[in-house]
Amino acid sequence: MSEELWQSCKEQLMEELNPAEFRQWIEPLNVEFSPENREFTIHTRNRIQLEKIKKDYLERIKNTIATESDRNIGFYLVVRNNTRRATPSSSSPQTTPPLKRKPSAAVTRSSTATGYRSGSGEKNHHASDPRTELNPVYTFENFVEGGANRVAHSAALYVASEPGQQYNPLYIHGSVGLGKTHLLHAIGNKFLSNTPEKNIICINTVHFVRDISKAARHKTFPQLQKFYQQADLLLIDDVQNFSSKEKSQEEFFDLFNFLLSKNSRIVLSSDTYPKQLESIPERLRSRFSSGITVEVEPPQLEMRVNILHSKARLQNVHLNDDVAFFIAENITTNVRELEGALNNVVAYANFIGKSVNMDIARESLKNSIALQNRQISIEHIQKTTADYYQIRLSDIYDRSRKANIVKARHVAMYLSKKLTSNSLQEIGQAFGGRDHTTVIHAERKIKKLIKTNNLIKRELNILEQTLNI
Ligand code: ADP
Ligand code: MG
């Protein structure tokens, strides 16, 4: 049971985190479960890793496990080889008290002097559900504006203020780590401080879908419906995860129409443009784009530097311009990676007891920079994939329709699109002169499979790791 729990927690985190982050921090963890004491011991490689897990992932791990298990479970973080269960102190392994299982219904909240309370008339919903809490750090004040997100930022600000109903729904899209969740919470936080008496529901699509399936099983739909219908502001994160669960889509469609008709505000985030949400039926997609659609893009150098300064200020860390530029020039993918790189530098500086400087930045980012600078070629992907599935390299370009070969070919095309900067045409060419639409088809197919098939998820994980080493 323990293995399974940890496995499903990992799967959940794999969905939520970006692949590099997942690989760097979660994948290497060694986790032990003691059934007698009902506790997890998480072994980390070193103190830096321990601090990082404690700061950025422990809460998430606890919450994920708490939603999967109905028993109280304790968590202990230790540096590998240290004796377990050492007493907590600054130099010994971190320990945390056991967790209580949290109920899974969503929470409406409006603030009181002491914090959140549950929505009117819904006393059964506990205000402490961690998944629906607005993150108080994700505010507009902490959000750096720039060319890459200007429109999204101003639309979000508008929706959070009065009158605010004109752009309804607001649909924010962009790839991973570019601030969609941050903006969603910023809207919630601002709306809450402007109008504390109103109800806000902020929920991730995965949890929304889960709540609906649960309500269907327990025949508690009416309560759930009533609960969501009270929202004055509904924030739904990652709607690309709506999968093809019919029931949840119908429910959402009805809820959507209900809320729009009473002028409640709806904000959605997604990793794709509404039209590309393939598993979602057309009527829902067109509902999504019936208000305003805005995009967040990867930030340019100057904005990356601004973000680093802003994040350093939040941690009370002094960051020289040369260090900020060094990090920003080398970490170009997205803000989450940028922030992760800064955290690595700061953790390393703390670890050796110095303040942040160029040498420390160089040393602690050595690996991630090497990784980013490495160019992965289509050819390398084809060879690695063919090896992995034990087929001939030529099978990858030829026309064979044997199922295992087609699968390997699709995987290789998908990885070529994901890991190289080649165009669809170039990828098609490299696969025996195929048309670019074949590549699109392969990519879609694999993306769809990933959602339902754990085996392929694992295979891709291994392949990506192999390719990145
Ligand atoms: P997404 O939901 O798009 O995957 P997140 O909102 O989770 O991305 O952002 C990832 C991290 O980057 C968060 O810690 C967030 O605070 C930070 N971030 C993203 N964009 C900005 C920005 N413009 N200013 C400050 N922080 C940002
Ligand atoms: Mg997000």
Image (tube, helix red, strand yellow):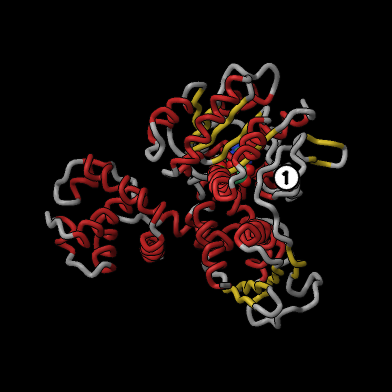
Q: Quarter of the image holding residue 462? A: bottom left
Farthest front residue?
219
> Can residue 144 be seen from the camera position used here?
no
Residue placed under numbered mark 1 in the picture: 125
Foreground residue, 418 or 193?
Answer: 193
Position of the N terminus, as image quadrant, is bottom right
Instruction: Relative to 255, say whether 386 is above or below.
Output: below
Residue 397 is situated, as x and y percent measured from the top left of the image, at 16, 55
> Can residue 437 be seen from the camera position used here?
yes
Farthest left residue?
399
Q: Quarter of the image holding residue 224? A: top right
> Residue at 52% across / 34% down in the picture?
252
Kind of residue at disc 1: His
Mark 1 secondary-structure assignment: loop
Residue 41 is situated, as x and y percent measured from the top left of the image, at 66, 74
Foreground residue, 275 or 332?
Answer: 275
